[in-house]
Amino acid sequence: MSNPNGRFGIHGGQYIPEILMNAVNELEAAYNRYKDDPEFNAELQDLLDNYAGRPSRLYFAEKMTKDLGGAKIYLKREDLNHTGSHKINNVLGQALLAKKMGKTRLIAETGAGQHGVATATAAALMGMECVIFMGKEDTIRQALNV
Amino acid sequence: MRLLGAEVIPVTSGTATLKDAVSECMCEWTRRISDTHYCLGSVMGPHPFPTIVRDFQAVISRESRAQILKAEGRLPDAVLACVGGGSNAIGSFYHYIPDQDVKLIGCEAAGRGIDTFETAATINTGRLGIFHGMKSYFCQDEHGQIAPVYSISAGLDYPGIGPEHANLYDSGRASYVAITDDEAVNAFEYLSRVEGIIPAIESAHAIAHVMKLAPTMSKDQIIVATISGRGDKDCAAIARYRGEDIHE
């Protein structure tokens, strides 16, 4: 749980250039306004269920459990979500929030490409412009996602 | 991504990997704030991002906690997830944090090993620092500059970790183990063969630790591990790692 200044113990905080302070303050205000808003949450839940395919399965890996010979192993299958990873959970929430804030353009970083694909997907769904920044090295090793 | 209508900008600065993509994104945001939202993908960066991303990912443990109670009538003994910045891990842990008997274990990318310079295991090798808008643990060189990090997994190839994880580590509530490229690749192949599930190479880091941990536990104990993503994207790279010459 973070305290009001966004600290987790000694960690966290906001070490950013002045020019971004307004932007993160605007985001924080919008988030505080919508995070407990029933209409916002109903809209997000509908997207998670009907677009992303939630809830994701909790699968009992019986063969693996037998083979390893110890604890029972359950796998939480975020790989079965639309776009193939957990990244869509966050992206649908943020894209919906951005739309409420009147933003028309999403930018995002990506490593393996999963977050980039999820962001591009949400942008397409919500009719927003989208620009993804990806390390050149990663565009080579994860070419399928580019 | 291009097919979906997005513009993809390859970043060539630094090591041309995830940290450089984050830096470039922050620069772009400063250039054009009015109509643009920076959709940060992990539980990192300046407040309020770590909190917002955690809340949206907490759906993972909200569901898994209810699902395991329904299936087994009790909570798991351990919850495992891979950690780069830490979004799937914090989502997998969050609703279990008050349950002190549930062990929370994050699996970091050791790359070629935590005793080498080719690693991305932040908790196991990093020090306190400030980068990308937050105070947390980061892999650093002897001058305190951010060290070039390495992992076979592009998604875990990041020199820092989200501040909430750093705090869970400080308080002892969660522990963080380091998994090498070799162990992750073995787990990638193992899960594919045994369960018919091809995990993302990121997620294979968590599976690798399941393979170590499960045999040390009794048959009435329970592990919940998160498969954060699917591994289609990794098949060619893993084949290359094994010395096969295939291309996408």
Image (spheres, coloured by chain):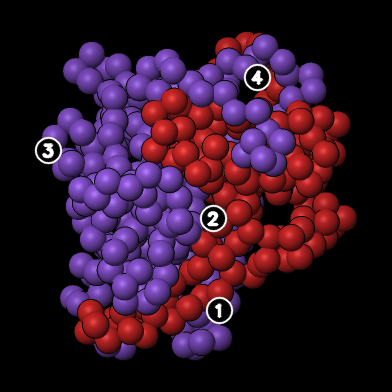
Dot 3 or dot 1, earlier in sequence: 1
Q: Position of residue A122 (x, y in %)?
A: 72, 45
Secondary structure state at the residue bearing disc 3: loop
Q: CA distance from mark 2 to mark 3?
A: 31 Å
Which amino acid does the dot numbered 1 rest on? Answer: Gln
Secondary structure state at the residue bearing disc 2: loop
Q: Position of residue B122 (x, y in %)?
A: 30, 38
Which amino acid does the dot numbered 4 rest on? Answer: Trp
Quarter of the N terminus of chain B within the rendering: top right
Provide the chain ID for the residue under circle 4. Answer: B
Q: Quadrant of residue B207?
A: bottom left
In the picture of the structure, the residue carrying the numbered disc 1 is B67
Query: Which one is closest to the eye, mark 2 or mark 3?
Result: 2
Provide the chain ID for the residue under circle 1. Answer: B
Q: CA distance from mark 2 to mark 1?
A: 19 Å
Q: Position of residue B55 (x, y in %)?
A: 62, 51
Chain that appears purple = B
Q: Judge whether residue B155 can be spotted in this image.
A: no
Q: CA distance from mark 3 to mark 4?
A: 37 Å
Q: Residue at x 63, y 59 (%)?
A: A82
In the picture of the structure, the residue carrying the numbered disc 4 is B29
Q: Residues within 10 Å of mark 3 (few under 14, many from 20)?
A: few
Provide the chain ID for the residue under circle 3. Answer: B
In the picture of the structure, the residue carrying the numbered disc 3 is B115
